[in-house]
Image (cartoon, rainbow, N blue to C red):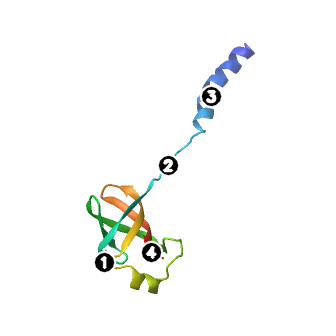
Amino acid sequence: MKKLLLSMVLALAAPFAWAQVSETTTTTTTTEGNGTITEYTPGSTIVLRETSGPRTYHFGKTVTYVTRSGKTLDEDTVRTRVKVGVPVRVHYVGTGDNVMVDRVIVDED
């Protein structure tokens, strides 16, 4: 009788014990685009002329500007070096028209 009662209690408790274990996996893919700047609105958008044609990228909340060698550019340098005609690479998160740039790499040191 005790074994039967214990088995019933375990059978009722098992689903709750397993239900407490959960795992969530979130995958974030960072992709890169490159081309020459054709339009640039600081803090808002950048349009690049890529091999497949023009593509508009929107800026995320924070964007880091760096040189090809990895040196971070200050705000004054960004104002003078990031402009129409400059080749850049952008790192972005998202797909399709819903992409957010988080890093702009100026293709010169």
Write down the residue under mark 4. Answer: 108
Q: Nearer the viewer, mark 3 or mark 1?
A: 1
Earlier residue among tags 4 and 3: 3
Give the quadrant of the N terminus.
top right
Outermost residue toward the left? 53
Write down the residue under mark 1. Answer: 84
Note whether 68 is above or below 16 in the view shown.
below
Q: Nearer the viewer, residue 98 or 80?
A: 80
Note whether 19 is above or below 64 in the view shown.
above
Residue 108's spot in the image, x, y percent? 44, 75
Q: Secondary structure at mark 1?
A: loop
Distance CA(mark 3)–CA(mark 1): 64 Å
| Location of residue 32 (image quadrant) | bottom left
Write down the residue under mark 2. Answer: 26
At label 2, which amino acid type do we have? Thr
Earlier residue among tags 1 and 4: 1
Residue 46's spot in the image, x, y percent? 33, 71
Marks 3/1 in contact by CB < 8 Å: the verdict is no
At label 3, which amino acid type do we have? Ala
At label 4, which amino acid type do we have? Glu
> Label 3 neighbourhood size at 10 Å, few (<14), some (14-19), many (20+)?
few
> Label 1 neighbourhood size at 10 Å, few (<14), some (14-19), many (20+)?
some
**Left or right, 23 with reference to 62:** right
